Amino acid sequence: MILTLVGNNSYSLGNDLKSAANDFIEKYGDLSIEQFEEHELNLDRLKESLLSPPFLSGKKLLILRQLSKNKEFNESFEQIFNQIPDSTDVILLEPKLDKRLKIYKLLNRKTDFRIYPELSENELKLWLVSETKERGGNINSNDAQYLISRIGLNQQLISNELDKLLLYDNNITHSTIELLTESTPQSTIFQLLEAAFNGKVKDVFSIYSEQRSLKIEPQNIIGMLTWQLNILALIKTAGERSLSLVASEAKLNPYVLSKSQVIARRLTLNQIKQSVFEILKLDVLSKSVNVDVDEALKNYLLELAY
């Protein structure tokens, strides 16, 4: 068996890796497993491990992480691949395997090739409701959506937060989510920008104060606001292209674009350009003259609100 696990969904990929390894251990024990990290990918040692027979066991399992980063091994892999004996099982972990590489085509053609993309917002919400029930708890769809908007789209991170919430109370609610979890800075900066463009001045200052209390520096907030404004500009200039195509071209998660689309629809391209121009001026000023960046950034957000 040669299994290739590809994709940036570490939660699903990790679960399948654990399942495959546990199945092997049940049959052959854990002494017949070897693991190689990226920095350990020495060609001679790998060849020896892949081609040599197992010791005191019917089979052995090799777990190879990010093999594609080893140029020397990539060039030799097809020849080595064809010599791997049936007594050796291999699992290759490749979170970011480039489709243009020869090794991608080889593995896709000749191994059990599994791809683990990040879930869409809706898929993640359905998973969260189901997974909470599976773990003996309960969360409704609205609160699942709230947790995702607060934490982000990382399934592994949400799984960790779910464990924490269930330890506190099996019935997960809006209030327990607020009590026990913290918004990721990027998610909150989106909320800050959304509040500003909606003219919600009170919310703007509340979110901004929360960011500063979390030790997020004004320069970091400027950087994240610039990133969000760039996304709005991408959406506004996308023309007839779909969000999924824009996301692919810009190497962004489609969830990030879909979340920003609501704001982009309410703004003109000139408004977005002006917002980018003003924050660029603020960024330059903050680095070149003696200016109170906190106050300047608050004034910038107020101008967006009005």
Image (spheres, rainbow, N blue to C red):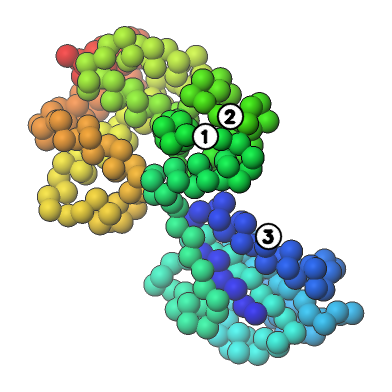
Relative to 284, 86 lies left or right:
right
Q: Residue at x 52, y 26 (%)?
A: 173
Tell me the quarter of the picture where residue 278 sits.
top left
Three-letter code, disc 1 = Ile
Q: Residue at x 79, y 67 (%)?
A: 25
Q: Which residue is mark 2?
A: 171
Residue 54 position in % (x across, y down): 82, 81
Kindly indicate whether the residue at mark 1 contacts the one at mark 2 (C-beta within 8 angstroms).
yes
How crowded is the residue under tag 1: few (<14 C-alpha within 10 Å), some, or many (20+)?
some
Q: Secondary structure at mark 1?
A: loop
Q: Secondary structure at mark 3?
A: helix
Q: Which mark is residue 91?
A: none
**Residue 277, can we see it?**
no
Tell me the quarter of the picture where residue 297 sits.
top left
State which quarter of the image contains the N terminus.
Answer: bottom right
CA distance separating discs 3 and 1: 27 Å
CA distance separating discs 2 and 1: 6 Å
Give the mark nearer the N terminus: 2 vs 3: 3
